[in-house]
Image (spheres, rainbow, N blue to C red):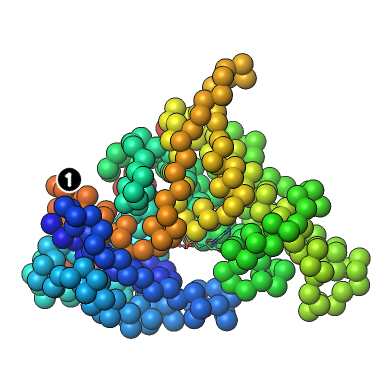
Amino acid sequence: MLVLGIESSCDETGIALYDTQKGLIANQLHTQMAMHAEYGGVVPELASRDHIRRLVPLTQAALQEAGVQYADIDAIAYTQGPGLGGALLAGAAYANALAFALGKPVLPVHHLEGHLLSPLLSEKQPAFPFVALLVSGGHTQFMAVRGFGDYELLGETVDDAAGEAFDKTGKLIGLPYPAGALLSEYAKLGSPDAFAFPRPMLHSHDLQMSFSGLKTAVLTAVEKTRAELNLAMDDPLPETVRNDICRCFQDAVADVLTAKAQRALLQTGFRTLVVAGGVGANWKLRENLSHISVKTSPKAAAETVQTYFPPLPLCTDNGAMIAFAGAMRLQHGVQSAQTADAFNVKPRWPLSDIVKQPAL
Ligand code: KG4
Ligand code: ZN
């Protein structure tokens, strides 16, 4: 069975073909990052228009990459939500029109289900059950993944996503959007002890996180430094200060995510951790999570944890995860949607609609 996957929830247009026998046979992506960079963030209207421009050529490129024809496609899966309304509509309209023209079923997919299942597309696959840490510009969540369709939201950020905090903090110190990758490069040159930034909700005894206060702490440090050095508003910070801020901010985020990952592992009893999303590329977070272990009591021996970092192209937004989630839905007997339902995009689709609630 051959499934075409369409992702258009934010600033990436992804088109992929997943064959249930051969695996992923095409994966095409166009990122709008450069287009949005000059505005310092994603401009929804520009995003929608660009998706419309890219969907057909990317599908043709995917068919060519796989050496198949439109007629070979058995089903069309697309991201129904959550995401930007207009961007989702571009993908939904295209998926439904193509499905209608080809006379094939259309499968609406929850974007987060795509992310959760994407590790199963990598060569070294984690076995169920596992804890998934989804950490990107839009999401920061821990989930218990017990099998297909069995996901439990364990906890998430109460305000900014971690990637968003990286981007906003980068903006404060004059870095271009999206700032995460560059900020983490500068962090390599900074001193970890230069600033004592807070670790918000580190001891909150749950799996909730908060990153907006950390961003405010950076703002206060930047303003204080500017005043001390007599810098004008548009003067750049000295490189050493910039690097120190990057290092201390990054370490604070990584510490919170690591401590919460340990809590999620203890709470579930699972010993496998999967990290997905763009912030998963961060070197400090990788270093921490690669060596993570858990203790069930202070005197117990440390238990090792297997940590998986799927390849970055599968961690960030892509069509492959949507094609794969669609194929899994078909294989598990989930019916395709009627057109009226399928065309109903869900920009604010809560994960709780498809996952179990955390135990009270
Ligand atoms: O998963 P992703 O590509 O897209 C979505 O947000 O959907 O994640 C992008 C986010 C951005 O906020 C970016 O700044 C951040 O991931 N990011 C990083 C690094 N590389 C990308 N954050 C920290 N360290 C990095 N090395
Ligand atoms: Zn995403």
**Viewer-nearest residue: 348 or 97:** 97
| Residue ID at (79%, 48%) | 193
**How far across and how far down the image is residue 104, in percent?**
11, 66
**How far across and how far down the image is residue 340, in percent?**
18, 66
Specify the amino acid type for callout 1: His
Q: Label 1, on which residue?
A: 332
| Residue ID at (26%, 58%) | 24
Helix, strand or loop under label 1: loop
Left or right for 2, reference 213: left
Quarter holding the N terminus is bottom left
| Residue ID at (26%, 55%) | 324
Quarter holding the C terminus is top left
Asked if residue 79 can be seen in this view, the reply is no
**Viewer-nearest residue: 259 or 347:** 259
Q: Is residue 299 above or below residue 166?
A: above
**How far across and how far down the image is residue 144, in percent?**
40, 38
Left or right for 309, reference 94: right
